[in-house]
Amino acid sequence: SSCCCSFEDYKRTTEWLLDQTNHRPKVAVICGSGLGLLADGAAHKQTFSYKDIPNFPVSTVPGHEGRLVFGTIEDTPCVFMQGHFHLYEGYSLCQVTFPIRIFKLMGVESVLVTNASGGICPDFKVGDIMIIKDHINLPGFAGQHPLCGPNDERFGIRFPCMSDAYSKDLRRLVLDVGSELGCSSFIREGVYCMVSGPNFETIAEARMLLILGCDSVGMSAVPEVTVAKHCGLRVLGLSLITNMVSLDYSREEKVNHEEVLQISKMRAEVLQKLVTTFICRYQQQSINNN
Ligand SMILES: O=P(O)(O)O[C@H]1O[C@H](CO)[C@@H](O)[C@H]1O
Ligand SMILES: Nc1nc2[nH]cnc2c(=O)[nH]1
């Protein structure tokens, strides 16, 4: 899975966007399944359909609007991806992570990745918000990795460190904001595991993930976070637990995407409050380096 996008491709898209908008975002928010609403709190919005942006992939999954929204949260210039891309859609990981490098070239400093995932940790409940502390890149173990192929030093080094992929400062800040908003009872921290999907886990797979130390499982985030870390962006990851993964053969519940969307729409408002307040505090504290 070597990279299919050249530096010129990234540059062309970046220049096109810089030409079309006066917004100069500092924070990028990636909205996961059913979480497009996170952009609603922004002012001075300017929206682009993915299909109109040169080189951009388009969204093919329900719950992903396929729009790039520029706007401000208080004084912070932001860009929101309403919908992101997945390996299971047939995209290469280079396409999946294409927007991250565009954000980098536009001057973004921090990326806030959100998504929906299934709870593995038995203490979790549906509706919990898990701050991603670390991840397991399962497709990466098998060579499905966004940084495979020639390394472009203009973005980052050949062998990036991943032990600090999720900024400690940003995690602390979102925990503080969460407790200030009275959300502490449903904010968790944990390890997110990426699988390629598109099927949900078998029970044996879910049990394996539990043994491996995963707290939740989903089909996104990890490629974007990896590419963001590679090019020096700070990362915060928030995963909404939309369902509990069956670990037990006696359980009758069967997960489906409609249920995932239903829970994320139900919790989007809370998550929006958390994200917008986080961005305000982020700006106030102007955390400059990790
Ligand atoms: O990770 P996001 O896109 O938020 O959504 C998660 O939910 C979808 C499955 O219901 C998959 O796309 C999975 O990755
Ligand atoms: N792989 C996976 N992705 C999800 N996205 C939302 N819920 C789930 C889940 O249970 N498993």
Image: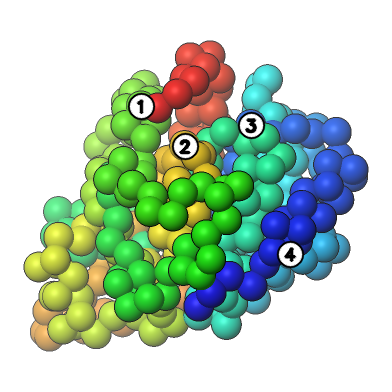
Q: In the image, is the residue at mark 3 within 8 Å of ligand 1 by its beta carbon?
A: no
> Please, what secondary structure does the residue beneath circle 2 have?
strand
160 in relation to 181, above or below: below
Give, as a three-letter code, the residue at label 4. Phe
> Please, what secondary structure does the residue beneath circle 3 have?
loop
Residue topped by disc 2: 234
Residue 144 spot, x, y in % from top left:
42, 75
Residue topped by disc 4: 56
Q: Is residue 2 visible?
A: yes
Residue 216 spot, x, y in % from top left:
27, 61
Point out the tag, 1 or 2, that comes first from the N-terminus: 1
Residue at image position (64%, 72%) is: 4
51 in relation to 12, above or below: below
Q: CA distance from mark 1 to mark 2?
A: 10 Å
Residue 268 spot, x, y in % from top left:
51, 48
Q: CA distance from mark 3 to mark 2?
A: 11 Å
Residue topped by disc 1: 169
Point out the tag, 4 or 1, that comes first from the N-terminus: 4
Q: Are marks 1 and 2 in contact (CB under 8 Å)?
A: yes
Give, as a three-letter code, the residue at label 1. Asp
Give, as a three-letter code, the residue at label 2. Arg
Q: How crowded is the residue under tag 2: few (<14 C-alpha within 10 Å), some, or many (20+)?
A: many
Q: How crowded is the residue under tag 4: few (<14 C-alpha within 10 Å), some, or many (20+)?
A: some
> Please, what secondary structure does the residue beneath circle 1 have?
helix
49 in relation to 233, above or below: below
Residue at image position (28%, 61%) is: 136
Q: Which mark is residue 26?
A: 3
27 displayed left or right of 234:
right
